[in-house]
């Protein structure tokens, strides 16, 4: 797809995906993880909004790495998140047999 294709993600969500992928590629795995406690979320030492995290979850681009019942939530990229970081026009085609809206 063209680099000029419009992204369906917000600029903040696309920025976070790109940061996560770059940190993964550099094997800085702590910086490749989104960490949230309540409404406070960070990627590495940089704060990001809960809305961005929720957007990435809604688009199924990150996966929960947390332990159930813990106050701290941890998220990492999944394969679709890596694709979306490389190609902003990428969308997850279907979820559970239903077409994406």
Image: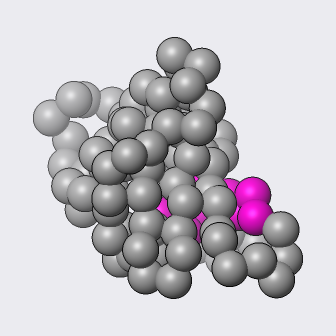
Residue 73 in percent (x, y) is at 64, 69
Judged left or right of residue 47, residue 53 is: right
- Number of numbered discs overlaid on the protein picture: 0
- On screen, residue 24 above or below 67: above
- Residue 44 image-quadrant placement: top left
Q: Which residue lies at the image location 33% right of the left edge and 31% below the top edge?
A: 1
Q: Is residue 12 left or right of residue 70?
A: left
In the image, residue 92 sits, relative to residue 4, either above or below, namely below
Q: Residue at x 43, y 26 (%)?
A: 22
Query: Residue lying farthest right?
Result: 68
The residue under the point 43% across, 50% down is: 43
Residue 89 visible in image: no
State the colouring used for the structure image.
one colour
Picture quadrant of residue 41: bottom left
Residue closer to the observer: 39 or 60: 39
Q: Position of residue 3 (x, y in %)?
A: 22, 29
Q: Is residue 99 above or below residue 90?
A: below
The magenta span reads 56-66
Residue 62 colored in magenta in the image: yes
Tell me where residue 81 appears, x and y as whole percent. 53, 46
In the depicted structure, whether residue 19 falls above or below residue 56: above
Q: Nearer the viewer, residue 5 or 65?
A: 65
Examine the rendering and report whether any part of residue 95 can be seen.
yes
């Amino acid at each position: 797809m063209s680099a000029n294709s419009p992204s369906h993600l917000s600029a903040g969500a696309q920025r976070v995906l790109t940061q996560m992928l770059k940190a993964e590629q550099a094997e800085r795995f702590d910086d490749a993880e989104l960490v949230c406690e309540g409404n406070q979320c960070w990627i590495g030492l940089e704060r990001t909004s809960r809305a961005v995290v929720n957007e990435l979850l809604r688009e199924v681009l990150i996966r929960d790495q947390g332990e159930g019942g813990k106050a701290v939530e941890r998220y990492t990229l999944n394969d679709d998140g890596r694709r979306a970081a490389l190609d902003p026009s990428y969308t997850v085609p279907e979820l559970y047999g239903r077409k994406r809206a």
